Amino acid sequence: MKPIRLATLSVLLLAAFTARAESLVVNGSLNGGIANMDVPTGWTVLEGTPDTMDLTSNVGVSGWHSFSMAPTASPDGGTWVGIGINGSYVERFGQTLSGLNVGQTYTVSWQAANFGINNHDNSYLGSNAIGVMLDGASIGHGATLSLSSSWHTESLTFVATSASQMLSFRLANAEKAYLGIDGISVKLGGVAPAVPEPSTWALMAMGLVAAGTLRRRQG
């Protein structure tokens, strides 16, 4: 194999794995300002009044309600979105995914926590799960979480049926609860791909080029 072909191969391999590692979600970290009844840039409120919050500001308003459990920072850091449910009242938010390949499997992953709301006469203390929807239809949900100070990493897979589809999140059952979500990503493949460190890629590319040079000299 000629050196130029080996070098080209290394570049193509790097591009392929990088593409698999990139999330299709805009602002999956849910970074934004504290907001009552609003979600960060890149996302849209679809039902009810989701909120953007941090460790000191529940339901987007500092001091208005207290957390039922002491909150901790999510693995993704920064702000997160809180979504509640109370019988027929549902909060849901989402965004349109673009560039999907029809028939291809994707993995959607997120961080979830149930700190609850402790407001005496109107507390949200129930157990619930983060439900995931695609074009308004449920594609599954994460684990049912009871009140806790911990974040949990969750994921599920779906097969794209269109080049653009609406991904959204709500709580999975009607039990009165209020959960936080953060670190949302959608990546190509049935499992989140393990991507080598940049130094590993550099060594691999150098090795391929060196091998090609050696073959040329031997030829």
Image (cartoon, rainbow, N blue to C red):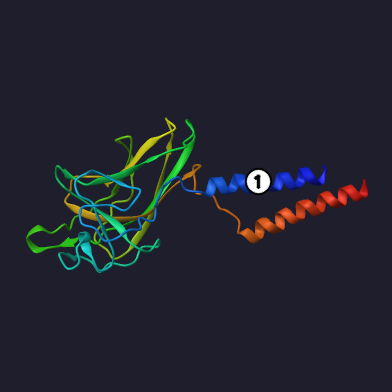
> Is 55 displayed left or right of 22 in the figure?
left
Q: How far across and down, in percent of the image, does residue 212 sit?
A: 82, 49
Residue at the far left in the pictured view: 121
Q: Residues within 10 Å of mark 1 (few under 14, many from 20)?
A: few
Residue located beneath label 1 in the image:
13
The answer to which of 99 and 113 lies nearer the viewer is 99
Q: How far across and down, in percent of the image, does residue 26 sit?
A: 41, 48
Q: How far across and down, in percent of the image, does residue 112 sit?
A: 33, 56
Q: Quadrant of the C terminus?
A: top right
Q: Which residue does the image show at 22% across and 60% down from the upper left?
A: 60
Secondary element at tag 1: helix
The answer to which of 127 and 197 lies nearer the viewer is 197
Q: For residue 161, what is the image quadrant?
A: top left
Vertical comparison of 5 with 197: above or below: above
Residue type, mark 1 in image: Leu
Q: Quadrant of the N terminus?
A: top right
